[in-house]
Image (cartoon, rainbow, N blue to C red):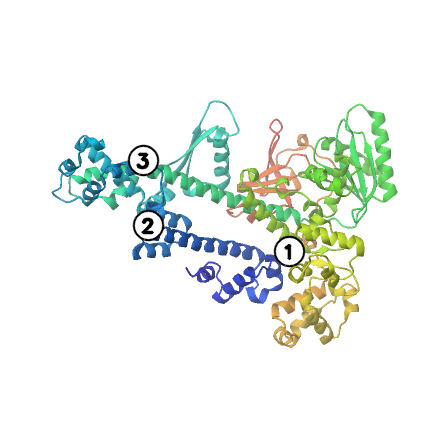
Amino acid sequence: MDILSILSQEFDISPAIAERIAQLIDEGNTIPFIARYRKEQTGAMDDQKLREMSERLEYLRNLDKRREQIEHAIIEQGKLTDEIRAQLAACQTLSALEDIYRPYKPKRRTRAMIAREKGMGPLAEVIMLQRKNDDPEQLARPFVDEDKGVEDVQTAIQLAQDIIAEEISDNAGIRAKLRELIGRQGMLRSVAAKEGDSVYAQYYDYRESVSRAADHRILALNRGEREEWLKVTVEIDEALANQTICRVVIDPPSKCCEVVRAAAKDAWSRLIEPSLEREIRSELTDRANAGAIRVFGQNVGQLLMQPPIRGKVTLGVDPGFRTGCKLAVVDETGKVLETGVGHFTIPGQERAKEQAKKLILSMIRRHGVTAIAIGNGTASRESEQFIAALLPEVPGVKYMIVSEAGASVYSASKLAAEEFPEFDVSLRSAVSIARRMQDPLAELVKIDPKAIGVGQYQHDLKQAELETALDGVVERCVSSVGVDVETASVQLLTHVAGIGKALAGNIVAYREENGITSRAQLKKVPKLGPKAFEQCAGFLRVRGANALDATAVHPESYPAAKALMARLGYDAKDLKRGGIAGITARVEQEGTKKLAAELGVGEMTLMDIARELEKPGRDPREDLPPPVLRTDVLGMEDLVPGMELTGTVRNVIDFGAFVDIGVHQDGLVHISRMSERFIKHPSEAVSVGDVVKVWVVDVDQKKKRIGLTMVKDRK
């Protein structure tokens, strides 16, 4: 198999680029590094495509390994022919390889094996010839042998039929035709497995085309089956399946045809149908798994890339009832300034509420708090109402409800042991909530991505694949923003390309003992060798004497960057003043091809350098709309159909998106209400973190459901 040619065709790139990308991957380069600093070699392929290509490269290489294993196994049996070798070479999928290998694969003791042991193999062979004048009973008489348990001709024919059925089942061509038939005309069917109401009631009598089954419904059916509420099958017209087999194996007219026809029917019902049903269900699950992981990854990426609310001293509030609401004020850098506890969520405790009011107002005024982050856990509604009532006394202060998904995980396992061991869990959560509003990325990387809660059925998915995908998403986000080495946590550094957990710990330990004032100094960190430095340096920001250290310009390009500034009449002082305005336009005026040749870099690298010199250390999150900060309180009881609201997209799933409209219950915008135009998936219209205008369609107070639309007047 020419893997590079396949990659070239599938990713629409030249064979030379495919070869260079494969080489870069094989050399141990990380995807973010390749995407950002090897654009000339990759044709500027983005990191998502590079990851897909890396995964496809691994799949094709594993396919080749499996092909070699199968070929070797068949050779050992002395059964490899030129035809089988050609069939193996033509396989493009693992399932196709396994179909060819099926007749040669070691099996448990089968009916066909027993029949062969009784000497029925030759009878099966002659019956399969289906010669015009042959009579199966006459053919079977010589094989009757009571000592072998073959008491009569009917027993002999049945045993031969068992052999024929297995041979039909093992026929790769027949299985391929039937697999294609099921994919085209098969139905996914579910019925109730027991009596009683459940969340799976809509699937108690459900049927959907295999080819059109939506990923989220496949996952729902799987979960319902696993919880024993549903029985799920794949249906196909039996007559059509038998007809498909008979077209291949029947050669009329002959009396033997009926034996073969009976064997074909048996092969379908006993061997092929159960096997293909498992395969089809597995393929559907794999597809749904991949789709859900893709959507979850997109959501996590969009959540991580939410714009930070910089420059605000923030009060974090972790709501509670019995033990009160824990309060924590952090400065603009996330440093804790003051903590406290306020009891203001239980009705009737007016004295406690008055004390809490005084405490919160004093904390706000004493530290210059301008933003408040309230967790959306227990008592968040009461906390929001209490805080909102205080805001008129501190003009300019606004609040935001922050999801606590994963906050307890973070608090218990990370912040407690590493930073504030003296704080209880709720107080640590208050700190986390405040910091998350200030910089979502820096805080959320401390949480297991699966705990963030922005996907669908993430706990049902293949966890190894999910973790690999999410690690890639986090790495991409961290690398695109860059990391300040002087303040970054171990958790944040862990996700920088080329840095793992151990190396991140070494960097922080070295920083605390020696300080880090330049990128070059990173080479002194224990175990941070040349390869690791090459991979991570461009994504780390160091604010020191060398202004380029605080930019995304890679150290390998420093000579080119300095030469470019000198060539155009600038120096490092201009860069330190906040960037060199207009340098990108100057480069284009001078001619990128000419300048690139002079400086010894590629044109794409030259333009990346110029853009970075113009806006050094630019944060891509700054281009996104800021989060919604509120001063008023809205409840479900206030909602009426047709009401116009502004909300923030919290989760995007296959059938719609959940939008936070400030009532402590996210509303659902169904995919049919998201756009004037037809869209195949909600991600075509919205992303997590988007601020959108919506209209209320319906409200169900009892079931806590809110229907929204993004298309006015569409119900």
Residues packed near mark 2 inside 10 Å, few (<14), some (14 to 19) or many (20 plus): few
Q: Alpha-carbon distance for marks 1 and 2?
A: 47 Å
Q: Alpha-carbon distance for marks 3 and 2?
A: 30 Å
The kind of residue tagged 3 is Ser
Task: Name the disc covering residue 497, or none.
Answer: 1
Q: Which of the two labelled residues, at mark 1 and mark 2, occupies the earlier sequence position?
A: 2
Which residue is the site of mark 3? 269
Quadrant of image for the N terminus: bottom left
Residues packed near mark 1 inside 10 Å, few (<14), some (14 to 19) or many (20 plus): many
Q: Nearer the viewer, mark 3 or mark 2?
A: 2
Quadrant of image for the C terminus: top right
Residues packed near mark 3 inside 10 Å, few (<14), some (14 to 19) or many (20 plus): some
Q: Nearer the viewer, residue 17 or 669?
A: 17
Which residue is the site of mark 2? 77
For image coordinates 68% across by 70% down, the residue present is: 585
How far from the left and from the top, in percent, is residue 689? 65, 46
For image coordinates 33% across by 47% down, the residue present is: 172
Q: Are marks 1 and 2 in contact (CB under 8 Å)?
A: no
Asked if residue 228 shows in the view, the reply is yes
How far from the left and from the top, in percent, is residue 491? 69, 48
How far from the left and from the top, in percent, is residue 436? 72, 44
Assign a secondary structure to mark 3: helix
The kind of residue tagged 1 is Ala
Q: Nearer the viewer, mark 1 or mark 2?
A: 2
386 to the left or right of 648: right
Residue 94 against residue 26 in the figure, above or below:
above
Q: Quadrant of residue 565?
A: bottom right
Q: Alpha-carbon distance for marks 3 and 1?
A: 52 Å
Q: Which of the two labelled residues, at mark 3 and mark 1, occupies the earlier sequence position?
A: 3
